[in-house]
Amino acid sequence: MRGALLLTLAAVAYAQPDQKAGGSEIHVLPVQGNIYMVVGDGGNITLQVGKEGVLLVDTGLAQMSDQLLAAIRKVTDKPIRYIINTHVHADHTGGNEKIAKAGITITGGNVAGNISDAGEGAAVLAHQTVLNRMSAAPTANQPAVPFGALPTDTYITDEKSMFFNGEGIQIIHQPAAHTDGDSIVFFRRSDVVSAGDIFVPSSYPIIDLQRGGSIQGIINGLNRLIEMTIPAEKQEGGTYVIPGHGRLCDQADVVEYRDMATIIRDRIQDMIKKGMTLEQVKAAKPTRDFDPEYGATTGFWTTDMFVEAVYRSLSQKK
Amino acid sequence: MSLSRVIHTIAGLLILLVSAPAFAQLDPSGEWAPRFHEDQPERIPGPEIGDYLGLPINDAARMRGDIWDASLLTLPEHQCKPHPADYGPRGPANLRIWKEVDRDSQQLIAYHTHISWQAPERTIWMNGRPHPPEYAAHTWQGFSTGKWEGDVLTVYTTHLKIGWIRRNGIPRSDKATLTEHWVRHDDLLTLVSIVTDPAYLTEPFIRTTDWVLDPRQVIAPYPCEPVTEVVRAPGVVPHHLPGTNTFLGEFPAKYKIPSAAARGGAETMYPEYQQTLAKAAK
């Protein structure tokens, strides 16, 4: 059983792209300030547009790249300058190669003089762990990632910041959450946060245990999102949150989701303390009151897989 | 008559036909004071823990009610939530309705509402605009469009945030939709509200709420600023573990109501349920 789960989780990273592959449209939703949310197959993409160019948070599925480029060109003719990857999975990094290739990096001085191709392609930023995983030797579940899709700039600290298109941008590492390489991206002037798959309101939290994810890391990430966001009035609007998948959200939506994740963690933790086995926990249906909102019996991330991931996450020796 | 004069005459008649209000519906605009004769115990003192009477809920909703801890509302991030559009009229709901018209055409664009508790404001679009795509943000008041059906203003609302249908933890999902019929009889206003929720309701949930016209009504502002009411470790979310909520039995015991009835369900909405209870009592 454990082997089956590990195999399934191993496949999560590259199974996600196939869940709705093909034929869907890309939609661009203006959020506020410089920010647009791009919705299509694969993960949500955040687009920051200004006089200095285009910055993307994630690039979606590889097969959607042409549509994504066309969508960007409907919004602006400015060059694509930066891509930030929130994590390693191919439904968020699949378009890296093609989108980066369509962009430019502005260089000067020694760089431009000594490295002839330094200006080719947009810069791709991510946590170091993302580069480590994407550049690892291919396996049965993880094909080789093209060189042109790899991050070109990484960070290993808790946070990296930059200033682009007239606003400060914080790239915040959230340890051991959806994976071990998650970044939350905060556009401070536009007041929009791109959460990646730490926050997926259309399903139960997706925990990639094999790539270092954990339920506590997810909850920590959700609490951090709540700390970062400020509602405008009556728990609504203000800071908007673009989730990894699903609709545009604000703090109140994150609060609902955090409450659910915390309550289910507490239940399963209590069952583990009572000595219940995984099968007994599953039989007790610890999510049944939240299933109509977040549950699934089919697809790449079922309720059963979520319960098992939480159980194993909480059972791991510290 | 010259051709140009004929054309001008026809054009003039068409303008008259388009711009003149053929039938003026009974405008609900005004200041409205709530009446609480319906469901008073639930609406004013508030529902008791474990009172699910008359709610067409499923087992999942029932469990959400069972594990709900009112201390949740002491968390700063929960303190300033307004009631959503489907619950707002049930609370201390002094209501203001006003209309927005296009200055040039005098066509009705929207009705707006303001309710006293937490001051939620809502727009009911009357100009035929489409509802947003699913990936757009959901709000407490949702996205509402209205149309006149005779003298009844029928409103359809989507894009609601996750909310509640009773203030004791019984949830309403963000998949729910709301259909309303606003009916004005002179100085009385009645709202028929129908919540359909594929996640937590087994049947549509229908409620009525009434107001009386009160032109002297003044609605006070309702600012809200969250504070730390209870010092807790970070990340704590108050709730009861399943099977540990000792308060659930108090409501049926206090009112001598059969426990099965207190658990709610669609059957408890209908008069025939009394026969079921009578048989069970034998």
Image: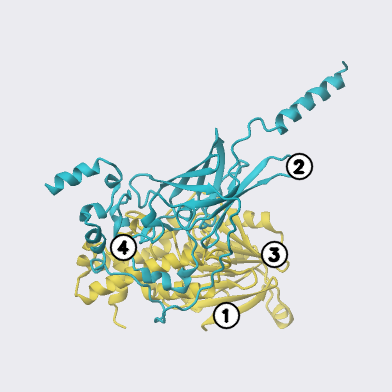
Residue closer to the observer: A134 or A25? A25
Residue B104 — which label? 2
Q: Which residue is mark 1?
A: A160
Q: Could you tell which of marks 4 and 2 lies nearer the N-terminus?
A: 4
Q: Which residue is mark 4?
A: B49
Mark 1 or mark 2, which is nearer to you?
2
Q: Secondary structure beneath disc 1?
A: strand
Coordinates of residue A71 in the picture (x, y in percent) = 63, 54
The type of residue carrying mark 1 is Lys
**Chain that appears cyan:** B
What is the CA distance from the residue labelled 4 to the residue labelled 2?
Answer: 53 Å
Are callouts 4 and 2 both on one chain? yes
Marks 4 & 3, CB-CB < 8 Å contact? no
Label 1 crowd (10 A; few <14 / some 14-19 / many >=20) = some
What is the CA distance from the residue labelled 3 to the residue labelled 2?
Answer: 43 Å
Coordinates of residue B18 in the picture (x, y in percent) = 71, 31
Q: Which residue is mark 3?
A: A79
What is the CA distance from the residue labelled 1 to the residue labelled 4?
Answer: 48 Å
Are callouts 1 and 3 both on one chain? yes
Q: Secondary structure beneath disc 2?
A: loop
Do we see residue A137 in this rendering?
A: no
Residue closer to the observer: B29 or A27? B29
The type of residue carrying mark 4 is Ile
In the image, B157: left or right of A30?
left
- Would you place residue A142 above or below residue B166 in this image? below
